Image: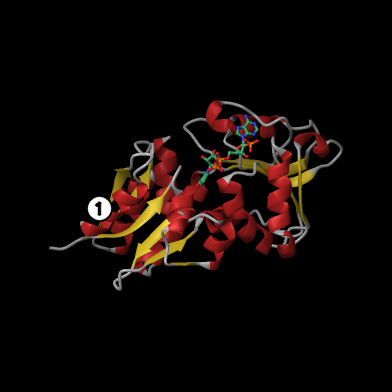
Amino acid sequence: MYIDRYAVIGNPIAHSKSPFIHTHFAEQTGQAMEYERLLAPLDGFFDAVTAFRREGGRGLNVTVPFKLEAYAICDERSPRAELAGAVNTLLFRNDGSIYGDNTDGVGLVSDLAFHGVTPRDRRVLILGAGGAVRGVLAPLLQTQPMELVIANRSPEKAIELAHTFADMGLVHGCGYETLNGHAFDLIINGTSASLGGELPPLPEDVLSPGGIAYDMAYGKDETPFQHWARAHGAAQALDGLGMLVEQAAESFQLWRGLRPDTRPVRESLNALR
Ligand code: NDP
């Protein structure tokens, strides 16, 4: 029997939880499909995609460091992928064209909602100005926070991002030292600092009493940022595993036209930690 093939492409890729998540979704919704890991050489993204399509591939999730290259190969992109300037989901259409989407931002907002967190009318601080932050800014601003501040180690990148998204809401870019004397209800860590066991240089009082902290990174243990947030009175200190599951659900829906229930996969992943 012919089975539709999907994969996550990246470098490195061995650690990816996407095959586990999509296999669960497929079983849950009764979809006949395969989902695998695809390691592409750093200079071989396009060739790897072409070979995968030739072998019957129907779609790809794209992870580090290929999201910009994925953006470039699309014939058509969703408005949110255009805004993000990066693509994490490719759909290979029957007419031979490639459609690109970015589901990271909606993944974050859905995960916040799952945990009962609504950015609307809150003071929100987002740390970092790399690809992940760029991808989530539009969906985050669409929730209408009172203000959104982007802080980055290299302030000029944060200022530039704020400028790009300025017509979507009150958004401001700065360096970490500018945060002194300001407090936020929700702080989202979109830096890669946690991956190296590090913490961005945050002022002591930057989290409002009972505020919420969210680290887009995730791992077996609590991240340094989650640890910092708990020590500074956070009501909730969440990590990005739920965002991963929610962005996957959005990709699955694009490919298969069905919305999987994310709760059972969340529970399985948490049990495996
Ligand atoms: P990028 O390499 O594009 O950007 C990294 C950002 O982190 C830059 O803003 C950089 O600052 C900053 N940074 C790195 N180290 C430090 C440090 N020690 N202190 C302060 N700032 C630092 O990475 P991505 O944007 O692609 O990924 C960021 C994070 O988001 C990663 O942890 C990744 O795992 C996570 N992520 C999670 C997803 C999920 O589904 N949960 C989806 C996508 C990403 P500078 O510009 O000054 O160098």
Instruction: Give the residue at the far right of this rendering.
Output: 181
Quick check: 39 above or below 123? above
The residue to which callout 1 is attached is 51
Q: Quadrant of ligand 1?
A: top right
Quarter of the figure with residue 197: top right
Residue 201 visible? The answer is yes
Name the residue at 82% across, 38% down: 178
What residue lies at 53% left-to-right and 44% top-to-bottom? 240
Q: Looking at the picture, tell me which residue is in the foreground, 270 or 46.
A: 46
Mark 1 residue crowding within 10 angstroms, few (<14) / some (14–19) / many (20+): few
- Look at the picture and state if 1 lies above or below 17: below
Q: Position of residue 45 (x, y in %)?
A: 36, 47
Please indicate whether residue 189 sits to the left or right of residue 250 in the image.
Answer: right
Report helix, strand or loop for mark 1: helix
Looking at this view, name the residue that lies furthest to the bottom. 95
Residue 186 seen: no
Q: Nearer the viewer, residue 158 or 126?
A: 158
Q: Is residue 226 above or below residue 48?
A: above
The percent position of residue 228, horizontal first and vertical second, equals: 67, 30
